[in-house]
Image (cartoon, coloured by chain):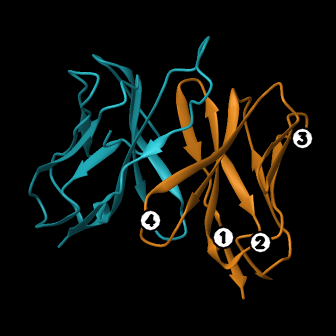
Chain colours: A cyan, B orange
Amino acid sequence: NAGVTQTPKFQVLKTGQSMTLQCAQDMNHEYMSWYRQDPGMGLRLIHYSVGAGITDQGEVPNGYNVSRSTTEDFPLRLLSAAPSQTSVYFCASSYRPGPGIRNYGYTFGSGTRLTVV
Amino acid sequence: SQQGEEDPQALSIQEGENATMNCSYKTSINNLQWYRQNSGRGLVHLILIRSNEREKHSGRLRVTLDTSKKSSSLLITASRAADTASYFCATSYGNKLVFGAGTILRVKS
């Protein structure tokens, strides 16, 4: 049971380049989310998904796309990287709250540290 | 603006003392969760309290929730040096989980 796996762990991009941050979970969680963490600002929600085929915008969605073709995978795409997107990105997942679900706290990946130059 | 705000921003205590962190939020919630983050690591879920609960315990952790004041507190009793970390409250509303800016806790041995 690997939990939430994020790749890569580190990435340097040039302004204008595009890339995809990968996130995979093996816990059959319905909910998945992407956050960015900047110093002094905590975690800000970028996009989230409540199940395969369903995505929605969070607090800071501009410049990012997501898709959820399977329950396991939730990739985050940077369309045209900008220095303002330099951050640490976290993917997280949880069960959908409901009958029989006792623990629906989120499980986090270890993060991707992205630098845009 | 963020949904939740923690207070204080930073807290420094001696080992063995209790640590209290507070969280205020703005909208009605489904539940409120607390997380810990050690330096350079991902977040770890500590405890969840539902909107119809007022207090919850887990080991040395005690969480209270006052929905009328839209606030929560996390108490860590008999703190240890290993409790040194950032602590975040997160509020669940709709299908989203939104975090505050966190409290940095330093426990001195």
Q: CA distance from mark 3 to mark 4?
A: 28 Å
Q: CA distance from mark 2 to mark 1?
A: 6 Å
Residue B11 or residue A78, whichever sits in front: B11
Q: Secondary structure at mark 1?
A: helix
Residue A49 in picture, x, y percent from top left? 38, 26
- Residue A41 percent coordinates (x, y): 53, 63
CB under 8 Å between discs 2 and 1: yes
Q: Position of residue A72 (x, y in %)?
A: 26, 28
Labels 3 & 4 near each other (Cβ < 8 A): no
User: Which one is in front in this view, the residue at disc 3 or the one at disc 2?
Assistant: 2
Q: Label for residue B60? A: none
Q: Judge left or right: residue A4 versus residue B91.
A: left
Q: Quadrant of the N terminus of chain A?
A: top left
Give residue A8's quadrant in the image.
bottom left
Q: Are marks 2 and 1 on the same chain?
A: yes
- Callout 4: residue from which chain? A
Badge 2 marks a residue whose secondary structure is loop
Give coordinates of residue A88: x percent, y percent.
35, 62
| Disc on res. A38 | 4
Find residue B69 and name its label.
3
The kind of residue tagged 1 is Asp
**Label 3, label 2: how many angstroms apart (C-alpha)?**
27 Å
Residue matched to label 1: B83
Tell me how far mark 4 sits from mark 1, CA to CA: 22 Å
In screen coordinates, is B43 left or right of B65? Answer: left
Q: Amino acid at mark 4?
A: Asp
